[in-house]
Amino acid sequence: MEELFDLPIQTKQRNVSSKPFHGYLNHNLYQSFGINEANLAEKVKDFTQQLWPDHGNQKIIIHSPPPDNDGDDEETKLGLRSHSDKNIITILHQYQVDGLEIKTKDEKWFKVKPSQHSFIIMVGDSLCAFLNGRLSSPYHRVRMTAKKTRYSTALFSVPKTGVIIDSPEELMDEEHPRMFKPFEYNNYRDFFNTEAGRIAQSTLHAFCAL
Ligand SMILES: O=C(O)CCC(=O)C(=O)O
Ligand SMILES: [Fe+2]
């Protein structure tokens, strides 16, 4: 992991994608790489070949450098701003350094302290919409409190292009009326990439709530 993030910036920038948020990203407090269709060994190999043309198998993803001061300024501690994931399901692993926080329905943040041998499975907005809101997609953020570099790896499952996310009738009744208009994932992701999508309190509700 360290070897990956220590590569020269020009090498890291070889990880490009035509899709938003899918290539190498470098923000103040974090850097990330993306592998599209990471379930396919071939795609992972392409990624490693881009970065290390002469040898194989290393994997990714998110890296937050330590906060650069000891102050209590919340902004400087935020490695990743509060958001819900837009995809179906996220499988997340954080290494030695904690930082992930999840917001409860009553708006309280709690620190996730997974063992190094476990994964966090998180519901994304697309699954929330498909399930007519029966499971919600939690807001989460990364807050850096230790003076250590933090690494995490995430696998985001994403609907295939053209698939319409449409909640089945079985999940609707008088107590649970239809909550969301059917939508195609790429249109939702593109909406999130607009000003209106980014500033919305809930991107999902702004995009397709009924
Ligand atoms: O680094 C983490 O633990 C969280 C990453 C995350 O929430 C994301 O990339 O959507
Ligand atoms: Fe996330």
Image (cartoon, helix red, strand yellow):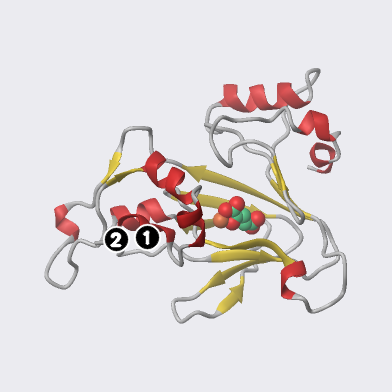
The residue under the point 29% across, 57% down is: 131
- In this rendering, the answer to whether 205 lies above or below 164 is below
Spot occupied by residue 105 in the image (x, y as percentages of width and height): 44, 76
> Ligand 2: does it lie within 8 Å of the C-beta at label 2?
no
Residue drawn at point x = 69 percent, y = 38 percent: 24
Residue 199 relative to residue 133: left or right: right
Asked if disc 1 and disc 2 are in contact, CB closer than 8 Å, the reply is yes
Number of the label disc, if any, that sits on residue 206: 1
Which residue is labeled 2 in the image? 209
Instruction: Determine which of the numbered discs, if any, sits on residue 70 in the image.
Output: none
111 lies above or below 22:
below
CA–CA distance in space, label 1 to label 2: 6 Å
Q: Quadrant of the C terminus?
A: bottom left
Relative to 208, is 154 on the left or the right?
Answer: right
Q: Quadrant of the N terminus?
A: top right
Q: Out of 8 and 37, give the one closest to the viewer.
A: 8
Q: Position of residue 133 (x, y in %)?
A: 31, 63
Residue 137 rendering spot, x and y as whole percentages: 43, 62
Report the residue that reaches farthest toward the front. 195
Q: Secondary structure at mark 2?
A: loop
Name the secondary structure under disc 1: helix
Q: Position of residue 183 (x, y in %)?
A: 30, 45
